[in-house]
Image: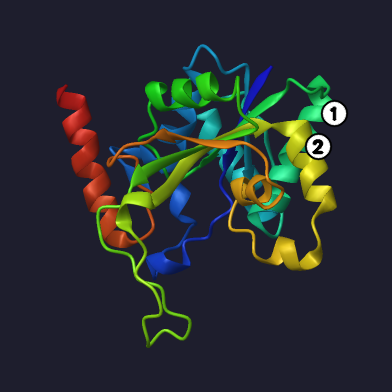
Amino acid sequence: MVIAAILAGGVGKRMGDIDKPKQFLEIGGKPILVHTTEQFVRHNRIDHVVVLCPEEWIEYTRQVFRSCPGLIDIPVISGGPERNDTIMNAIGYIEREFGLDQDTVIVTHDAVRPFVTADMIDRNLDAIGTADAVDTVMPATDTIVVSADGTHIIEVPDRKTLYQGQTPQTFRAAAFREIYGTLTGEEKAILTDAIKAFVLKGRNVVIVRGSTTNIKVTYKSDIEYAETILESISRE
């Protein structure tokens, strides 16, 4: 079984003065979250979709979905205080609703990456057949520098070995729960996403290619860029 978990826990602090979390801002006349969720609902290899958001926005999210054909019955549940807590909530939901075994696959995706494609999802699902976890990435195009104090450069890594992480990220739900339960408090504190948990424990993590258009809407300027991408897609 393959379940997509759409992570809609952000509040959009870097957006500045907005009256709702960024996943509810509109591009092309409908909320970003709707664009994103539709991509997974339409995919024929995804069995179920669940959306996770802050408790106080659950009913609002349900109302948004009620006005969208095909999304009316999408379950919306509460996320957690951190990203990986939200994923654990998703796994708990999957176990309650469908049962959980070693082959249950969860595809996690940022709600504010509305331009995920069927090909990206397929690449994730193909790769998970022989890996413990899959990360969607793009090769770094800029030189990356490392600074411990925000002032002095201490390292300039070889760009050829560097990649920028995107989502989807895909793994077996039971494996993540097992790994997460073995992490120390210090290890949990440095996690930026689920994939790092697999890396910390030496599991086999593979990468698949994302896309330059698979942007994460973070700043107000990203809304304008997203509109441009959407217009380009609609002309294809």
**Within 10 angstroms of label 1, few (less than 14), some, or many (20 or more) residues?**
few
Specify whether 13 is left or right of 199. Answer: left
Query: What percent of the width, then of the height, locates residue 92?
Result: 81, 37
Query: What percent of the width, then of the height, locates residue 169?
Result: 54, 38
Specify whether 215 is left or right of 194. Answer: left
Specify whether 100 is left or right of 28. Answer: right
Query: What percent of the width, then of the height, locates residue 51?
Result: 61, 37
SS for dot 1: helix
Q: 127 or 30: which is nearer to us?
A: 127
Q: Quadrant of residue 138?
A: top left
Type of residue at label 1?
A: Arg
Q: Quadrant where the N terminus lies? A: top right
Query: What percent of the width, then of the height, locates residue 234?
Result: 20, 26
Q: Are marks 2 and 1 in contact (CB under 8 Å)?
A: yes
Write down the residue under mark 1: 96
At x 79% / y 41%, what residue is drawn? 177
**Within 10 angstroms of label 2, few (less than 14), some, or many (20 or more) residues?**
some
Type of residue at label 2?
A: Gly
Q: Quadrant where the C terminus lies? A: top left
